[in-house]
Image (cartoon, rainbow, N blue to C red):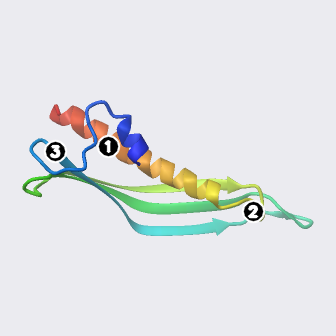
């Protein structure tokens, strides 16, 4: 996520609280995951599906007063087709994290355009 936030021109990363500093909080809530296996042909499995679903929440707060300035919430499902039982799950995990962090970046860009920040 930190890498994605650096790509937004309107924001600058800060580790300190202060005037004109936004506190950005991203949450994954109601996280669900599962697999679905496709048809079998002999001993080989085809079409094993790995999926993740979560509600992605983005909250922007004033860092001095802790007042909520904006909040977005969206339900997102990420599906990854695996090549079979030997495919590592790390690729599917990475896809899910990249998709969710990209969504947070997109919402930050939209909010900054709407607000004129």
Image location (x, y in percent) of residue 27: 34, 61
Q: Cα distance, mark 3 to mark 1?
A: 17 Å
Mark 1 lies on residue: 107
Tell me the quarter of the picture where residue 102 sits.
top left
Q: Nearer the viewer, mark 3 or mark 1?
A: 3
Residue 82 position, x and y percent, is 71, 56
Residue 50, above or below 5? below
Nearer to us in this view, 25 or 96: 25
Query: According to the image, label 2 marks what residue?
Result: 38
Of label 1 and label 2, which has the lower sequence position? 2
User: How far is the residue under mark 3 from the one under mark 2?
Assistant: 49 Å
Q: Can see residue 69?
A: no
Instruction: Please give the residue where the numbered disc 3 appears in the rendered image.
Output: 21
Left/right of residue 51 with respect to residue 49 in the rendered view:
left
In the rendered structure, which disc, 3 or 2, sits on the residue that comes first in sequence?
3
Element at label 2? loop
Q: Residue at the far front: name it.
A: 16
Residue occupying image coordinates x 26% and y 36%: 11
């Amino acid at each position: 996520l930190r890498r994605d936030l650096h790509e937004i021109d309107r924001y600058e990363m800060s580790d300190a609280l202060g005037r004109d500093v936004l506190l950005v909080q991203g949450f994954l809530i109601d996280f669900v995951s599962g697999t679905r296996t496709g048809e079998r042909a002999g001993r080989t499995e085809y079409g094993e599906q790995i999926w993740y679903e979560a509600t992605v929440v983005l909250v922007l707060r004033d860092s001095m007063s802790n007042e909520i300035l904006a909040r977005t919430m969206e339900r997102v499902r990420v599906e990854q087709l695996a090549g079979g039982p030997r495919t590592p799950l790390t690729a599917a995990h990475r896809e899910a994290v990249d998709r969710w962090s990209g969504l947070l970046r997109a919402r930050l860009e939209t909010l900054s355009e709407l607000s004129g920040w």
